[in-house]
Amino acid sequence: MILRAFRQEARDWLAENCPPSMCTPMGENETLSGGSKQKSPNPDSYVWLDRMHSKGWTVPHWPQEYGGAGLTKDELVVLLGEMSEINARIPLAGMGVSMIGPTLLEYGTDEQKAEHLPKIASGEIRWCQGYSEPGAGSDLASLQTRAVEDGDQFVINGQKIWTTLAQYADWIFCLVRTNPDVPKHEGISFLLVDMEQPGVTVKPIRLISGTSPFCETFLDDAIADKRNLVHKLNQGWTVGKRLLQHERSGIQALAQAAVGRDSRAPSGIPIAEAAKQYLGVVDDKIADTDLRAEITTYLMNTRALGLAQARSVEESEGGTPGFTTSTFKLRGAELRKEQLELQLKVRGTQALAWEGDDYSDEELEVTRNWLGSKAGSIAGGSNEVQLNIIAKRVLGLPD
């Protein structure tokens, strides 16, 4: 009865408050990830954010005191399902809600939670990740960025790379070396660093896809207050690993199961519809039977992954599974590449152009997303690293 009443409440509220344009395919750069440095061209994005935040539904499963609504898992699934019914967009994305926020809920002090979580929930601030370095990628624990204690502060020097969208971030969560004289995993700390200070320099990296989602971030005598040390000194590796598990799965996996309609092309056109548009139909089915079978298999595998993630989350005590998240990261990266390969097969030569009047904006976007998808098996931990984790931590195989 309680869930039924909540479902009706959510349905009525969404019908009254969701702007019509927020129930349409996402336009370029319309996703809000917090902060004020990257603007959505659609004013309704901000209307939707404000209304959802007023309900605590930007982070609906967080405690109310930190800007959430305190929903249970079941209520969250109901809410996401009702949003799916009207094709409503998620109002707020980014590393704040998916990575550092859940991590602070587990490891943060009361002061850290009170300072940072409400600003994440409202979209006031945006976060980026300071993990990889030029000499520490897959072997992340070899990182050399140093943080030296100086009174009530840490002084930080070093370089981070592949810091996604750092040019738009207000804060960065960093793994830094605070003790170089112990085994490498034991001398790492987890710091929250304000990007708006002297000593922090960001340089975007232009990719083959033509975009610059990744950056180099240089830290030259940058400062972090000791109150922004998360967990304990020299025990940041534990926090850093847990954050990656939130990134790879977390309670947001329930969203994938709840909104389990077919995966969409970058332009918002479902793959099956795009295939009918480019290849024609026979009896209202994609004319190319082989490609139809490939698309069906892809959609089934995507749905299966979402259900596996949701089941794993529901079975976990803390809302986010442990090492099994590596299986989700591995499979998700491969499915993303499969999706873009199918997009190319559907469009043929129309998806192999960089520019030209003979190609639509959507076709050119598919080309760039296809190129960009190649990074998916590296970003967030390479496929090889995930296979290693699965072998050791999930299957229990010997080193």
Image: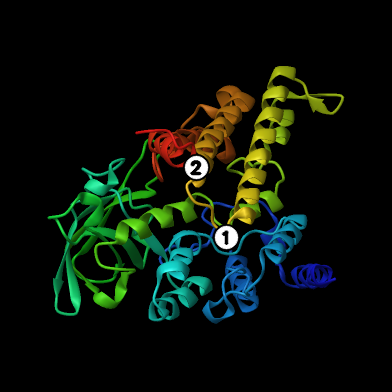
Residue 228: x and y, percent? 30, 73
Residue 35 visible here: no
The quadrant holding residue 15 is bottom right
**If you read the primary sequence from the N terminus, does the residue marked by circle 1 or circle 2 appear first?**
1
Residue highlighted by disc 2 = 329
Name the kind of residue labelled 2 in the image: Lys
Residue highlighted by disc 1 = 319
Residue 68: x and y, percent? 58, 74
Q: Is residue 357 left or right of residue 192?
A: right
61 or 321: which is nearer to us? 321
Residue 58: x and y, percent? 59, 68
Q: Are marks 1 and 2 in contact (CB under 8 Å)?
A: no
The quadrant holding residue 6 is bottom right
**Quadrant assignment for the C terminus:** top left
State how far apart marks 1 and 2 are (Cα). Answer: 17 Å
Q: Residues within 10 Å of mark 1 (few under 14, many from 20)?
A: many
Which of label 1 and label 2 is nearer to you? 1
